[in-house]
Image (cartoon, rainbow, N blue to C red):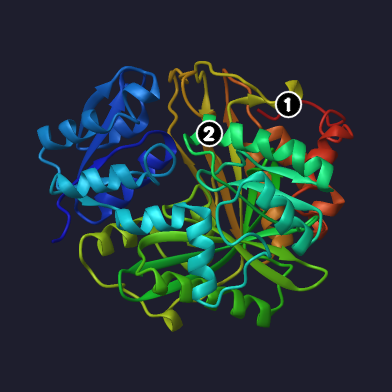
Amino acid sequence: MAIERLFIANRGEIAVRVVKAAKVLGIHTIQAHSEADTEMLAVKLADEAICIGPAPSKDSYLNIPAILEAAKTTRADAIHPGYGFLSESPAFARAVEEAGLIFVGPSADTIERMGDKVAARQAAEAAGVPVVPGSDGRIDVTEALSVAEKIGYPVMIKAAAGGGGRGIRIAKDEAELKTLAPQAKAEAEAAFGDGGLYIERAILSPRHIEVQILGDGENAVHCYERECSLQRRRQKVWEEAGAMCLDDATRESLCASAVALAKAVNYRGAGTLEYLYDEAANEFYFIEMNTRIQVEHPVTEMVTGVDLVAEMIKVCGGAKLSMTQDEIQKTGHAIEVRLCAEDPYMNFMPWPGVVSTLKEPTGEGVRFDHFLSEGYQIPPFYDSLLGKVIVHADTRDAAIDKLVNALEEMEIGGTKTTAALHLALASDAEVRAGAFHTQWLEPWLEDGNLSATKGDAA
């Protein structure tokens, strides 16, 4: 069944992205919005819009009955969840399917299986994908001590459910493990309603590499890899395609492992497999799968020319993949930086405000995915992401130069943004050399590298 009327159950820049992709496919778009998002750009661009509740997320974008009722009222035949909110909720996917609608994403069973880190790890092992040495399943504190002794310290204690860096602790020895494991359990219970834990060997100073895959439930292909090692508080701030730290043989092996796992779980839609890469040992380990479109998908689109959002809409509507693996070619290098309404000079304090001026960066190989307009009141209720500046060039050095030009050209008046952070990173010698890892950015910030820069480019 091809999708004809698509309900977008999300907000912000991803809602705009889905509306635009659907319109190219000739699909009627219906934008959901909270009372706080009436003036959001996606609402203006969609063919129609409907309010699903008050500003708080729990009353709107996380309110499954309200979303389904609105979809029914507007005669939608499919729901796109975007990223965040309910995008990786098996309960939501199941409710959508039970309501007779198409969920633009994998099946509820796949989301459930791959959303549980223990089950995902077991699926990866069964598909022959390397995983970090660790526990075989959910464990208690006593079992954690036994496993840690076997695999060696330091170990990472992780929540079995959820993501976003919640519930993670690193223990250097047995004493720390005894102290930190109960803390991780309590945080996981508070954040996800699930206190399940597992542990794995901590790979110190790894690089974060991920592979973009597409599947139609039977076949799967990859769209190469991205590097997302520049992170603050385990949140990505700067992403690239491809990963310059990989040699061709490692890249080929990494991408093949991602396709093998996607096929093993009969994956449908767009998804991402995340890996830790130990550069010194030239070894990679699967850590988790994101069963949705990701914030950083544009860099992959820039280097491959594949419209990932359109492709996921088509395959979830029943179509087969429109391309074979050998038809997906990679050219040049792309970089994306996340632009948030935060003051980077004030410990990244959120800074909602009214957009007084908006000047978008322009030029070949420059893309600005956002949901802003002049006069728009940035609501204080949601994530601070305003948009993403994405650039593509023949080489990584040229892409960084183009990023600097784009950030300097761009103007967003009336709020603070993290543009200054990205300009400072772009001028840093280690960033230019690609000499960083997942624990690199926070010490760099603590050393005053940002505060030493001149002016606020926002």
Q: Are marks 1 and 2 in contact (CB under 8 Å)?
A: no
- Amino acid, disc 1: Asp
| Residue 187 visible in the current orientation | yes
Q: Is residue 107 above or below residue 242?
A: above
| Residue 202 visible in the current orientation | no
Tell me the residue that label 1 is attached to: 456
Query: Mark 1 to mark 2: distance in Å?
Result: 39 Å
Looking at the image, which residue is at 66% across and 36% down? 182
- Residue 197 versus residue 308: which sits nearer the camera? 197
Q: Identify the residue at the far front of this view.
A: 142
The mark total stands at: 2
Looking at the image, which residue is at 32% across and 22% down? 59
Query: For the residue carrying disc 2, how many other residues have a C-alpha within 10 Å: few (<14), some (14-19), or many (20+)?
Result: some
- Side of 8 where 260 appears, left or right: right
The nearer-to-camera label among 1 and 2 is 2
Looking at the image, which residue is at 79% across and 39% down? 442
Which structural element holds mark 2?
Answer: helix
Q: Is residue 263 above or below residue 9?
A: below
Which structural element holds mark 1?
Answer: loop
- Residue 13 versus residue 412: which sits nearer the camera? 13
- Side of 294 where 17 appears, left or right: left
* Picture quadrant where residue 443 is located: top right
- Side of 437 where 318 appears, left or right: left
**Whole-percent x and y of residue 148?**
75, 56
Tell me the residue that label 2 is attached to: 189
Q: In the rendered view of the protein, which quadrant contains the C terminus?
A: top right
**Whole-percent x and y of residue 32?**
27, 32
**Whole-percent x and y of residue 416?**
63, 22
